[in-house]
Image: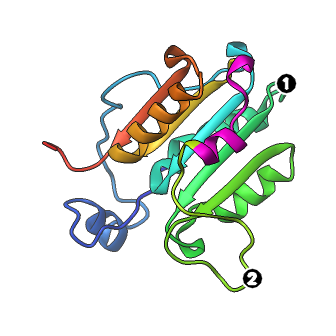
Amino acid sequence: MLTVERLADGEVSPYLVDELRPGDELELRGPIGGYFVWEEAYGGPLLLVAGGSGVVPLRAILRQWAAGERTAPVRMLYSARSLDEVIYRQELALVSSENAEVELTLTRAWPDGWDGHRGRVDRDMLGRFAFPAEHRPAVYVCGPTGFVESVAEALVELGHEPLRIRTERFGPTGT
C-alpha cells in the first residue's frame, strides 16, 4: 500500500496524485536507511510519535500490533496542523477503540468545541502522555527532521534510553 501526500511544489507527489492511474506500473526501490519496524518480540510498551505524514510508517506498526496478540500496551501521539490534515483519521479512531491510546494534537487550527491537545509536541506533553522511562518502551518517532530531533531530545531528557528510540525523518535535503 502506498500513501502519498501531495505537495504543490513537490517533484514527484503531484504526478503520483494527479496523473497515476490504476494499472500504471511503477518501479520502487526499498527504503534507504535503518530498520524501522516493530515486532511483538521486542516486548515492553510501544510508544509511537508522529508529525504530519510521519504517521504513515507508524500506521503500519499499529496494524502489525492490531494483527498480533496485543500483549504490549501501545500509545500514539500524532501532531497535525488541523483535524482535516489528520491522515487515516477513521482507522486511527477504530484502533483507539481496540485498546490502543491514540491522541491527537493540533498545531494551527481547531474545530469548534475541540477539547483535545493544542500545540506542538514538547517535553511537557511527552511527560504527560509517554510511558514512564522506567517501563523501557520501544519508541518510534517519525516526521519532519526538526520534529523528530526535538521529540527524541525531549524523550532522552525525560530519561528514555536513546537506544530504545528509533527515528525516521524527512524533509529538504542539504539542511
Secondary structure predominantly adopted by residues drawn in magenta: helix
Q: Nearer the viewer, residue 21 or 50?
A: 50
Q: Secondary structure at mark 1?
A: loop
Check residue 71 in the rendering and tell me which mark sits there, or answer none: 1
C-alpha distance separating marks 1 and 2: 35 Å
Q: Is residue 124 above or below residue 5?
A: above
Q: Residues within 10 Å of mark 1 (few under 14, many from 20)?
A: few
Q: Residues within 10 Å of mark 2 (few under 14, many from 20)?
A: few
Q: Amino acid at mark 1?
A: Thr
Is 97 left or right of 164, judged from the image as shown?
right
Query: Residue, x 78% and y 46% (percent of image)?
Result: 101
Q: Position of residue 43 (x, y in %)?
A: 73, 16
Say which label, 1 or 2, has the lower sequence index: 1
Q: Nearer the viewer, residue 61 or 135?
A: 135
Check residue 113 in the rendering and tell me which mark sits there, or answer none: 2
The reply to whether the C-beta atoms of the residues labelled 1 and 2 are less than 8 Å apart is no
Q: Nearer the viewer, mark 1 or mark 2?
A: 2
The segment highlighted magenta reads: 124-135
Q: Is residue 161 above or below residue 91?
A: above
Q: Is residue 66 above or below residue 92?
A: above
Check residue 169 in the rendering and tell me which mark sits there, or answer none: none
